[in-house]
Image: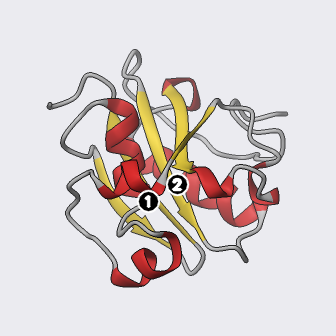
Amino acid sequence: MKEPGFTNLTGVELGGVQGVQVVIGLGFTTAATATDVDVALADAVQAARCTWSDVAEIATLDSRRRHPALARLDIPLRFHSAALLASVRVSHPSAVVEQATGTASVAEAAALASSGARELLVPKRCTARVCTAVARIGGPV
């Protein structure tokens, strides 16, 4: 059975708050695989205590537009420039990420920029290759 939001993610049982729309900010290395991204996104949905139908979009850096790790996603994607993301104030900026991408934050800044919120519902969470952060649309601004 197909899990909403993905063509290849199964077995995720999530109970959540219906009607809350969220944006998941997504940052990842060039070495990240589709499975790496799927697992990190599933973890973010679970941490936000929402369901896949509550995810309005996934936001990331525009230089990742054609990355194969995004190929299986069927949730709308929004791509932001490094300059826009660099203008967003975040709690956990990274000098390493800034050196690699031109912005000190991708996941946090993308979630905040796309949602219009100024606070994250779920702070940045990282695996070895993927970082996520979740913001509620219409959340604290």
Q: Which residue is mark 1?
A: 106
Could you say whether the residue bearing mark 1 is in a helix, strand or loop?
A: loop
Identity of the residue drawn at 35% across and 52% down: 109
Q: Is residue 132 depicted above or below 118 in this figure?
A: below
| Residue 73: quadrant of the picture | top right
x, y percent for residue 140:
15, 31
| Disc 1 residue type (three-letter) | Val
Q: Quadrant of the C terminus?
A: top left
User: Marks 1 and 2: in contact by CB < 8 Å?
Assistant: yes
Q: Which residue is mark 2?
A: 26
Identity of the residue drawn at 70% across and 73% down: 30
x, y percent for residue 16:
42, 30
| Residue 17: quadrant of the picture | top left
Q: Quadrant of the N terminus?
A: top right
Could you say whether the residue bearing mark 2 is in a helix, strand or loop?
A: strand
| Disc 2 residue type (three-letter) | Leu
Identify which residue, 49 or 33, lies in the foreground.
33
x, y percent for residue 55:
51, 30
Identify which residue, 18 or 82, lies in the foreground.
82
Identify which residue, 17 or 126, lies in the foreground.
126
x, y percent for residue 106:
44, 59
Q: Is residue 4 depicted above or below 31 in this figure?
A: above
| Foreground disc of the pair 2, 1 | 1
